Amino acid sequence: QLNSIVENMLINFNEKVPDSTRIKIKARGKNLYEVVIMASLLEKEVRTLEDMKLVSGVLWKRMEIGMPLQVDATLAYITDKKTGEITNEDKLIDSPYNTYKYRGLQPTPIANPGLNAINAAIEPEVSNYLYYLSAPSGETIFSETLEEHNENKAKYLK
């Protein structure tokens, strides 16, 4: 029974992610697995396709410059907490899923990403942003500098 469920999931995934998409992924120097891992972050972090594309750009850029991804959704995955409940202590957890402690992508996806997240992971929006946060309203607030990001945290995450 489990084998047929997994088989159906893989068939569905292969129908939704055609060869043309896989060619795009390869052309960008990525592989399908890392795109799915990135898409899982986007799925858990932000709501709209536009925000997913911008956050994708931020996260790929952080990887390029050697900056930790610092994605709260990975800590939520480890701790079973909501992202708004994450503490500084949680950021010290020794886990390969802790993107505050370890650079690069976590070992596996943390969610089942939808097509919007997968497409955003493949086609990131290039911007000057290096930081973002999700306000309680669901709005994503972007910043270029750590100083601006900290101001936004004080303003939106009271």
Image (cartoon, grey):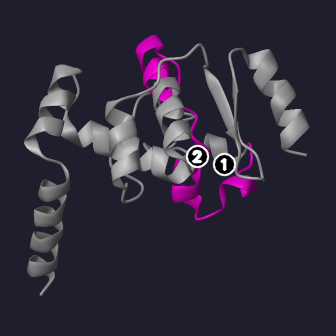
The one nearer the camera, 11 or 153, is: 11
Q: For the residue labelled by badge 2, is the local secondary structure a helix, a strand or a loop?
A: loop
Quadrant where the N terminus lies?
bottom left
Residue identified by numbered label 1: 90
Dominant secondary structure of the residues highlighted in magenta in the image = helix
Q: Position of residue 143 (x, y in %)?
A: 71, 22
Q: Position of residue 135 (x, y in %)?
A: 76, 46
**Left or right placement of residue 79 versus residue 105 in this view:** right
Q: Residues within 10 Å of mark 1 (few under 14, many from 20)?
A: some
Question: Image height check: is 80 above or below 101?
Answer: below
Residue at point 9%, 71% (across, down): 7
Residue identified by numbered label 2: 93
State the extent of the magenta-drawn residues as a range. Answer: 59-88
| Amino acid of disc 2 | Ile
**Left or right placement of residue 28 versus residue 108 in this view:** left
Q: For the residue labelled by badge 1, is the local secondary structure a helix, a strand or a loop?
A: helix
**Left or right placement of residue 100 versus residue 90 in this view:** left
- Reply yes or no: does residue 60 show up in magenta: yes
The one nearer the camera, 20 or 103, is: 20
Q: Do the CB atoms of the residues marked 1 and 2 lie less than 8 Å apart?
A: yes
Quarter where residue 60 is shown: top left
**Can residue 77 be seen in the rendering of this structure?**
yes
Question: Image height check: is 119 above or below 77?
Answer: above
- Reply yes or no: does residue 147 show up in magenta: no
Marker disc for residue 44: none
Q: Residues within 10 Å of mark 2 (few under 14, many from 20)?
A: some
The one nearer the camera, 116 or 108, is: 116
| Amino acid of disc 1 | Asp
Quarter where residue 119 is shown: top left
Residue at point 52%, 48% (across, down): 74
Q: Position of residue 26 (x, y in %)?
A: 15, 26
